[in-house]
């Protein structure tokens, strides 16, 4: 699944819902382009996303772009596509 996220504080909750509702979360692979302001890290950045056991085997690959440098949805969708295609690192079992 490709996601272009622009300063979205609901992204973490959305990913948790998708993982929880999936019949087989291990088959999920999210390629995400995070477009963030420096003040967004806790509310919208990587710390707000599911990690470790909360992933239930789902894979996340991320690219981060400064919101001020964002060139719109086309660029962020392209970056999300590249992340989706890139193999995800092994998930931390903790």
Image (cartoon, rainbow, N blue to C red):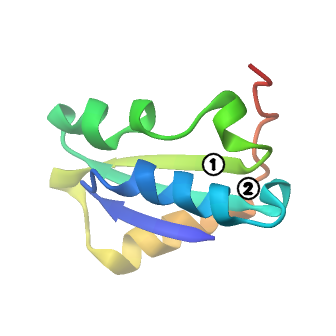
Q: Is residue 44 visible?
A: yes
Residue 32 rendering spot, x and y as whole percentages: 52, 57
Q: Residue at x 29, y 30 (%)?
A: 42
The numbered mark, 2 or 1, whose residue comes first in the sequence reads 1
Whether pointer 2 and pointer 1 mark residues with C-beta atoms closer than 8 Å, the reply is yes
| Snapshot quadrant of residue 76 | bottom left
Q: Is residue 30 visible?
A: no
> Where is 2 relative to 15, above or below?
below
Crowd band around label 2 with a 10 angstrom C-alpha radius: few (<14), some (14–19), many (20+) = few
The residue under label 2 is 86
Nearest the eye: 83 or 40: 40
Identify the image quadrant of the N terminus: bottom right
Q: Residue at x 28, y 56 (%)?
A: 8
Residue 25 vs residue 19: left or right?
right
Residue 10 rendering spot, x and y as whole percentages: 32, 55
Please, what secondary structure does the residue beneath circle 2 have? loop
Rounded to the nearest whole Å, what is the CA distance between mark 2 and mark 1? 7 Å
The residue under label 1 is 61
Crowd band around label 1 with a 10 angstrom C-alpha radius: few (<14), some (14–19), many (20+) = some
Residue 16 rendering spot, x and y as whole percentages: 54, 51
Identify the image quadrant of the C terminus: top right
Please state which of the two labelled residues, at mark 2 or mark 1, is closer to the viewer.
Answer: 1
Residue 39 vs residue 91: left or right?
left
| Snapshot quadrant of residue 69 | bottom left
Q: Residue at x 75, y 46 (%)?
A: 88
Residue 72 vs residue 31: left or right?
left
Q: Residue at x 25, y 61 (%)?
A: 70
């Amino acid at each position: 699944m490709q996601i272009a996220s622009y300063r979205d504080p609901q992204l973490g909750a959305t990913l948790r819902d998708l993982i929880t509702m999936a019949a087989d979360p291990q088959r999920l692979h999210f390629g995400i382009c995070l477009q963030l302001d420096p003040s967004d890290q806790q509310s919208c950045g990587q710390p707000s996303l599911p990690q470790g056991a909360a992933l239930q085997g789902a894979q996340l690959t991320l690219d981060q772009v400064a919101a001020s440098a964002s060139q719109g949805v086309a660029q962020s969708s392209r970056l999300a596509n590249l992340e989706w295609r890139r193999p995800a690192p092994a998930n931390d079992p903790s």
